[in-house]
């Protein structure tokens, strides 16, 4: 019987030590928890606003469009502005990294001829009527050489880029023709 009391007594003492250790850990955890600052007010609203802002920004970059459609749109804008536009060089869609983000980019060189006000109208139309992510990367406007064949007094050489979201999965960011 003494052996049974011995085992019960030692077990009781060990459990008391465990309870003390757990109590000490609980007190430490409570102190650490008290040191954590409370969440800022309106955190859920701020998260919702940030999500909406992100989705709006993502929507500003369309999926890659047909290169033929972009060229056709530029030619229609030139015609509406009363200038002659000739797309000279195009490059296929490529993926570029800007600010840690990847974008699909289509580059196009265009030469447009017309009078100065018509060229200004054409440039204004490109800034407002084309895909919102069209960027005029370079523009040189010169007075055209006076010849009998040349009736338009100004020539604009434009380097254009259209930015879009990269196409999913193909790695090129490209869109079909």
Image (spheres, rainbow, N blue to C red):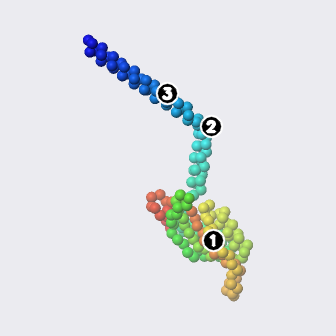
Looking at the image, the residue that sits furthest to the bottom is: 148
**Viewer-proximal residue, 75 or 111?**
111
- Tell me if mark 1 has few (under 14), some (14-19) or many (20+) residues whose alpha carbon lies within 10 angstroms of its own: few
Residue 159 horizontal/vertical position (percent): 60, 71
Residue 41 image label: 2
- Tell me the residue that label 1 is attached to: 138
Residue 4 horizontal/vertical position (percent): 28, 15
Residue 129 horizontal/vertical position (percent): 65, 63
Rounded to the nearest angstrom, the CA distance separating label 3 from label 2 is: 28 Å
Residue 130 quadrant: bottom right
Q: Earlier in the sequence, mark 2 or mark 1?
A: 2
Residue occupying image coordinates x 57% and y 54%: 58
Q: Earlier in the sequence, mark 3 or mark 2?
A: 3
Nearer to us: label 3 or label 2: 3
Residue occupying image coordinates x 57% and y 50%: 55
- Tell me the residue that label 3 is attached to: 27
Helix, strand or loop at label 3? It is helix
Residue occupying image coordinates x 59% and y 46%: 50
Q: Quadrant of the N terminus?
A: top left
Could you tell whether 57 is left or right of 8 in the image? right
Q: Does residue 136 show up?
A: yes
- Tell me if mark 3 has few (under 14), some (14-19) or many (20+) residues whose alpha carbon lies within 10 angstroms of its own: few
């Amino acid at each position: 019987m003494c052996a049974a009391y011995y085992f019960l007594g030692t077990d009781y003492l060990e459990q008391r030590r465990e309870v003390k250790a757990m109590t000490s850990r609980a007190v430490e955890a409570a102190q650490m928890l008290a040191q954590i600052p409370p969440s800022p007010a309106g955190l859920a609203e701020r998260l919702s606003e940030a999500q909406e802002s992100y989705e709006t920004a993502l929507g500003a970059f369309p999926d890659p469009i047909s290169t033929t459609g972009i060229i056709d749109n530029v030619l229609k804008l030139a015609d509406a502005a009363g200038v002659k536009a000739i797309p000279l060089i195009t490059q296929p869609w490529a993926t570029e990294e800007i600010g840690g983000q990847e974008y699909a980019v289509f580059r196009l060189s265009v030469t447009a001829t017309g009078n100065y006000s018509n060229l200004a109208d054409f440039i204004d139309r490109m800034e407002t009527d084309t895909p919102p992510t069209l960027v005029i990367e370079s523009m040189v406007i010169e007075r055209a050489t006076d010849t009998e064949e040349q009736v338009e007094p100004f020539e604009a050489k434009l380097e254009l880029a259209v930015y879009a979201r990269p196409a999913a999965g193909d790695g090129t960011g490209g869109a079909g023709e």
